[in-house]
Image (cartoon, grey):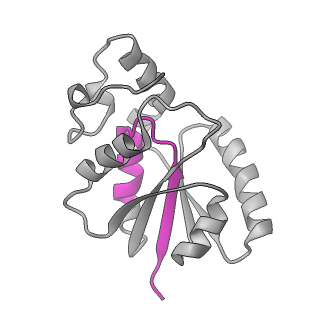
Amino acid sequence: MKKIAVFPGSFDPFTIGHEGIVRRALTLFDEIIIAVGANALKKSYYSLETRKTMISSVFADEPRINIDHYEGLTVDYCKRKGANYILRGLRTAADFEFERAIAQVNKAMAYDIESVFLLTVPEHTPINSSIVRDIIRSGGDASRFVPAAINLKDYRGEED
């Protein structure tokens, strides 16, 4: 049976921490679907299509990674895609507590789907999309916090 993992998130923007988790997870899974959550209730800095384009540029060389988007429950999306794993990265103990609660509810809804957590490498611990987004909004240089394949100068934030 093919081991397919879904790596869900808003990825607004995709960071080097996200990239690190996905590249390390390639040793564990046959396929990873990076699933950008489309949440109508949440205001994004970058459009859904821009985020997907950014992520696609990072993994253009990796055929085992697919970029997609979804709305609704992650476990329902996993079922539609035939994925039995949800991949998540952990930076801190607070991340663990938050992710543990979600994973336990997901397990109650879909017993056959496992949540798999990978710790970030220490140098990526302070990096998160909110901080990177704030740097970009303020006109700072956030290039060291996003994958090399993403040239932030090519993308404008699309906030209203």
Name above or below for residue 96 compared with residue 134.
below
Task: Identify the residue shown where x is 42% and y is 37%.
Answer: 47
Q: Is residue 149 left or right of residue 130?
A: left
**Relative image position of residue 82 (x, y in whole percent):** 54, 78
Name above or below for residue 129 compared with residue 14.
above
Residue 128 visible in this rendered orientation of the protein? no
Name above or below for residue 142 compared with residue 59.
above
Task: Identify the residue shown where x is 50% and y is 26%.
Answer: 130
Residue 7 visible in this rendered orientation of the protein? yes
**Relative image position of residue 5 (x, y in whole percent):** 49, 68
**Relative image position of residue 114 (x, y in whole percent):** 63, 69
For the magenta stretch, what is the residue range?
1-24
User: Within the magenta stretch, is there residue 22?
Assistant: yes
**Relative image position of residue 77 (x, y in whole percent):** 59, 66
Task: Identify the residue shown where x is 31% and y is 26%.
Answer: 156
Q: Is residue 50 left or right of residue 12?
A: left
User: Within the magenta stretch, is there residue 15?
Assistant: yes
Task: Identify the residue shown where x is 46% and y is 24%.
Answer: 159
